[in-house]
Amino acid sequence: MPHESYKKWAERLDVLPNGYPPTEDGAELRLLEYLSTPEEAALAAELRLTLETPQQIAERLGGDAKVLKKMLKTMLRKGLINAGRAEGGFGYGLLPFVVGIYEMQIGRIDAELAQLFEDYYQRAYSRVLAVEPAVHRVIPVNQTVKVDMAVHPFESATGIVDSANAWGVMDCICRKQKKLIGDPCSHPIEDTCMIFSQRSGAFDGNEIVRALTQEEAHATLKRAADAGLVHSVSNTQEGLHYVCNCCTCSCGVLRGMAEMGIANVVARSDFINQVDADLCQGCETCVDYCQFDALTMGEEFVIEVSGMRCVGCGVCVPACPDEALVLVRRPEDELRPVPQRASDWMRDRAAARGLDLREVL
């Protein structure tokens, strides 16, 4: 039976806006038990979202700051907590399970961890994915959008790449997890998930993230799109530091749409596909690329677009041999507001779940 500290940590994670709901059989506890020691779990359960130095944590909780610092550094290497500049020095704090702890396990995931995650995913994760605002937001590559249309950087994967000063890529933990449990998909695993920083050289020497040049980052986006992958980011306008190149067959978020029928699992982009009936030859190549069943053959062998199903990813656009597809901006009354900052997303998500963020700040 998992130590009591794992239950406290799980409860702490569930009062974060992202959520970490409990299961009847304790699947969420077995997952945390695999990732950490009881002592690490007990410390994680006492951390806050606001980063604190080891000295500040010691003053609040008691204990020796040097001992705490050593444990916190170990937990950070394991991908269990957050860290960064804080008032008074280098600080540590709570990290959500998704997006956060789970994604940081790309360097240590094995068949056992993959199955533990799958057990938890199947039992509880629909309760995370069904809450709005959504965890992820779909964005297109700028080249798939109508050429005379203004596109903000946060609306385009290309714009996010161009706004960064450092670029990196790592393997996709979602597709790796599905492969480890014996249910692989045909999409690539290696070098597909992208991460960015405003600090030049941020990924140099990183053991998990392979540093890229800006040109290589653009090439990675294109390679992902050519493979039929959908670009998604955190559901905010500012602070975008990663692009997940996802698929509905393996992605922990998009699987919710494919397997659980959760329509609002991901926030769609502000664009929608448009078909030029004069150019469309009815070859249905685009249908094979669409992961959301948004494209069907209509009358007179012209592709039709479902406004309800199209998420505006643009993956099908470059696949059309006749250049009959293009993304256009949705009508004003169909646009959904995107939270400005992560703090706005957390506030809105906490309100939707009836949480008081003061408990964890």
Image (cartoon, rainbow, N blue to C red):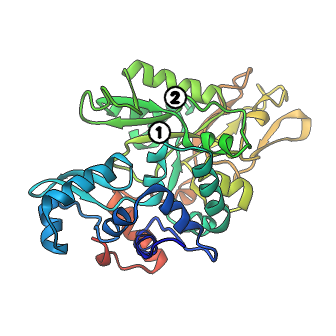
What residue is pinned by disc 1? 107
Q: Residue furthest right?
A: 300
Q: Quadrant of residue 44?
A: bottom left
**Residue 153's spot in the image, x, y percent?**
39, 39
Is 308 positioned to the left or the right of 75 in the image?
right
Residue type, mark 1 in image: Gly
Q: Quadrant of residue 151?
A: top left
Tell me which residue sits at (61%, 47%) in the image: 251
* 291 in relation to 267, above or below: above
* 170 in relation to 111, above or below: above
What residue is pinned by disc 2? 191
**Dot 1 crowding, Cα within 10 Å, few <14, some 14–19, many 20+:** some
Tell which of 1 and 102 is nearer to you. Answer: 1
Tell which of 272 and 13 is nearer to you. Answer: 13
Residue type, mark 2 in image: Asp
**Residue 331's spot in the image, x, y percent?**
57, 52
Tell which of 221 and 189 is nearer to you. Answer: 189
Q: Residue furthest left?
A: 88
